[in-house]
Amino acid sequence: NPLTPIQLSVQRLRRRYLDKIEDDGTFGESTEIILKEVDALKTLVNEFSSFARLPETKKSIEDLNDIVVEAVNLFKVAHEAITFDLNLLIEMPKMQLDKSQLKRVLFNLFDNSVAAMNLAGNIEVVTELDSDSQKIKLSVSDEGCGIDPEVYNQLFEPYFSMREGGTGLGLAIVKRIVSDHGASVKAIANQNRGTRFVIEFPSGLQITKDPNKRTLKIEAQDLEVEKNEWC
């Protein structure tokens, strides 16, 4: 990566000359800007590489609820200011899913929610069975500032970002992985405030089906998942 020698060279210049050059601060300010922008470019390059080199989807028989719980517990370790409400379908049909890639989808959606809520707030995750289509739906909702409906369709395009410093690839990766499962993803306004991302899985992924639409309310706390009440 040619950005690395640029970064190292600027760091070397700062170590050697920052305290020796007598100027109006131009040297220090300029080299600091270079380092900051190099870091931003490295992030962009890494995200692009991840997007361009997404591994081939490898599906196995999985429980979507288990994937959700595992992703939430892992995410909470590094985001203590974020709380989760989980409302998960009882007797979830087994499906043909790529567990690692779907966890990545959830991490990207969680990251998006955290940024929208300024690093603190509540995220709701719901799994449900649509009684008409018999399709499983997974939704992630936040309490952030919301998104202009006019840009909903642009959210999943590569390099489109509404936040400063964003690469615009996180949601593009989400769409790629979801599409590889034959599923769809969309953004809609949350009922109260914020944004809801909804993923709809085709019924063909299901190994077994159950018309039971009851949900189990779960709270994720630290690394434990406690079953609280029936809804």
Image (cartoon, rainbow, N blue to C red):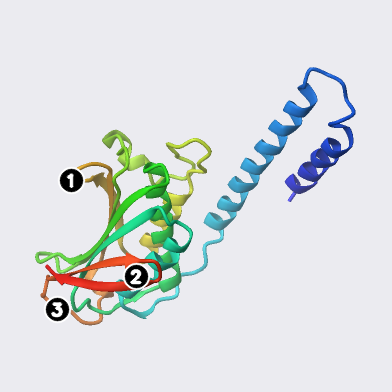
| In-image side of 182 versus 30 (left or right) | left
Residue drawn 42% across and 46% down? 119
- Amino acid type of disc 1? Gln
Residue 69 shows which numbered tag?
2
In this rendering, the answer to whether 6 lies above or below 89 is above
Q: Residue at x 40, y 48 (%)?
A: 114
Label 3, label 2: how many angstroms apart (C-alpha)? 21 Å
- Sequence order check, earlier mark of 2 and 1: 2
Q: Amino acid at mark 2?
A: Val
Quarter residue 89 falls in = bottom left
* Residue 175 in the image, given as x and y percentages of width and height: 39, 55
Dot 3 or dot 1, earlier in sequence = 1
Separation of marks 2 and 1 at Cα, in angstroms: 23 Å
Provide the residue designation for mark 3. Answer: 210
Name the amino acid type tagged 3.
Asp
Contact (CB < 8 A) between labels 2 and 1? no
Q: In this figure, which residue is indicated by the disc labeled 1? A: 191
Q: Which mark is residue 155?
A: none
Give the vertical position of 59 relative to 190 (above or below). below
Residue 128 x/y as whole percent: 19, 66
